[in-house]
Image: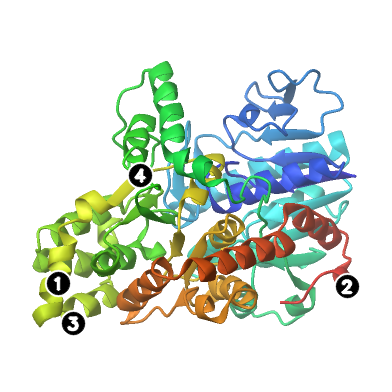
Amino acid sequence: MRILIFHGYLLGGTGSNVYNARLAEALVGLGHEVHLLSQERHPEEHRFIDAIGDWDSGALRVRPAAGRGAAEGARCTVYRPDIGGLLPVYVADRYEGIEARTFADCTEEEVSSYLDANVRAVHELLGRVRPQLALANHLVMGPVILARGLAGEVPYAVKVHGSALEYTVKRDPDRFLAPAREGLAEAQAILVGSHHTAQSLWDALGDEELVQRTRLGPPGVDVARFAPREREIAEGAPRALAARLRRSAAAQRTEPVASAFARDELAAAEALERLHPGEDALVAFVGKLIVSKGVDLLIAAWPLVLERAPHARLAVIGFGAYRAGIERMTAALAVGDLDQAREIALAGRSLEDPEAAPRPLRHLLAFLDSLGGEERERYLAAARELPERVVLTGRLEHDELADLLPACEALVVPSTFPEAFGMVAAEAAACGVLPVSAAHSGLAEVSDVLARQVPGQAARWLSFPVDDGAVRALASRLCGWLGADPELRSRTRAGLVATARERWSWQGVARGVIAAAGGELEQLQKP
């Protein structure tokens, strides 16, 4: 079957990028022919891609990917539409070779130009490859691009990821509600990662008919890549990865990178060399370094963890504009400057975006203000170890994360903003690593599934409430797990791995997308 997918962003990193890369790979593995539109600048780095198309010369040119042979008969072709120099995004980010600007900061003319360029590309592919089914990603602008570009000739489904809904459509409905509705109007099915996202979608669009076409379609886990490793291999993973990054950095001979968004392979290698899973209990955070991911709560909780587990080490894996805020808070706590920590908490998102109005991190403030007496002294004593016990690696690629996660004891997903699905939590579970997630939105739904398959004591450590007690609650979950007896930990890991393999394989996701695009809703679960 020939399947066209519109994504419009990259094919590496996190979130919807990983979703589309792994989905395309799974569809190819099932014998389908995939035509994927993205803005990926290095598609040849993905082994499932056979051919590459672009409009850089003014007309569509398709060539074989390096080492793949002829473009004819390609199993997966990736196309990069010519959208000019501007890529509208949902959250501030950096992209190679193009300016990325949030939809909110784009003019009507800029959004219209982006939309038209992609519609032209889709319409040309309609005549060229004759797709039989299609999938649009993101509430805007993917669905309306397919609606216009396919002109009703090809049935399509829509995969709603959280960012477009929460950061763009709901924040500016006057501008973006109409294109969202247009894109969904002709969709055979709307796939969401969780009931939470479904309800948020229904509330935002105010269309009761959407409920009848909405089905669960969470992301998947590559259970071949994300899997437990033999102890010796897992413990050696950080240094092995660091060595690869050092070789790559030496080969490129690039200058040190000064951007919070860019990948600095040498700095990442140096950070990874500080991780010693044979000696330390490693805990990871994986995600964008933005305020809504709640990493401030985890940093504040770490001295409480160190009081009871002094051998614990936190690896913060990710990139983003709030990295400077994280570094400032870590430094303030390490020298016992709670006043400075309070100022950082009061500044909130303005440290991520200087033009944003300060929005205090109220749960962090509540914790800092509650410290007193002997507890305060113990906390500050433990916080002195933060520079040694917290490691910021910067961005790691998805396959690199698959190598590193099995070396960890736990992973924390402390988001304070709704998440469509706890993808990184599911990946951690597949590796036998306990995911400790905020108890809301799609994260809670992943935790609930896992909780039914692990011992009751461990089930309590899978989630924590995001409220004024969040910092202490998070620390207590981590300390409970790190101090658990080996037999309980072994049974818990077995339950995590088995559940991830059964519930979240990419092959199952791919079959669900085909059913959704074909309108076979009876095969799909209602949220």
User: Please, what is the three-letter code of the amino acid marked with disc 3?
Assistant: Ser
How far apart marks 2 and 4 lie (CA) works out to 48 Å
Observer-side mark, 2 or 3, equals: 3
Secondary structure at badge 1 equals helix
Residues at badges 4 and 1 in contact (C-beta under 8 Å)? no
Image point (73%, 53%), residue name? 506
Residues at badges 3 and 4 in contact (C-beta under 8 Å)? no
- The percent coordinates of residue 136 (x first, y second) are 71, 54
Dot 1 alpha-carbon crowd within 10 angstroms: few under 14, some 14 to 19, many 20 or more: some
In this view of the protein, which residue sits in the foreground, 505 or 42? Answer: 505
How far apart marks 4 and 1 lie (CA) works out to 25 Å
Q: Quadrant of residue 183?
A: bottom right
Mark before the other along the chain sequence, 3 or 4: 4
Secondary structure at badge 3 equals helix
Relative side of 22 to 32, left or right: left
- As drawn, 248 above or below 324: above
User: Please, what is the three-letter code of the amino acid marked with disc 2?
Assistant: Glu
Dot 4 alpha-carbon crowd within 10 angstroms: few under 14, some 14 to 19, many 20 or more: many
- As drawn, 380 above or below 57: below
Residues at badges 2 and 1 in contact (C-beta under 8 Å)? no
Secondary structure at badge 2 equals helix
Observer-side mark, 1 or 3, equals: 1
Image point (65%, 21%), residue name? 57
Q: Which mark is residue 522?
A: 2
User: Please, what is the three-letter code of the amino acid marked with disc 4?
Assistant: Leu
Q: Which mark is residue 370?
A: 3
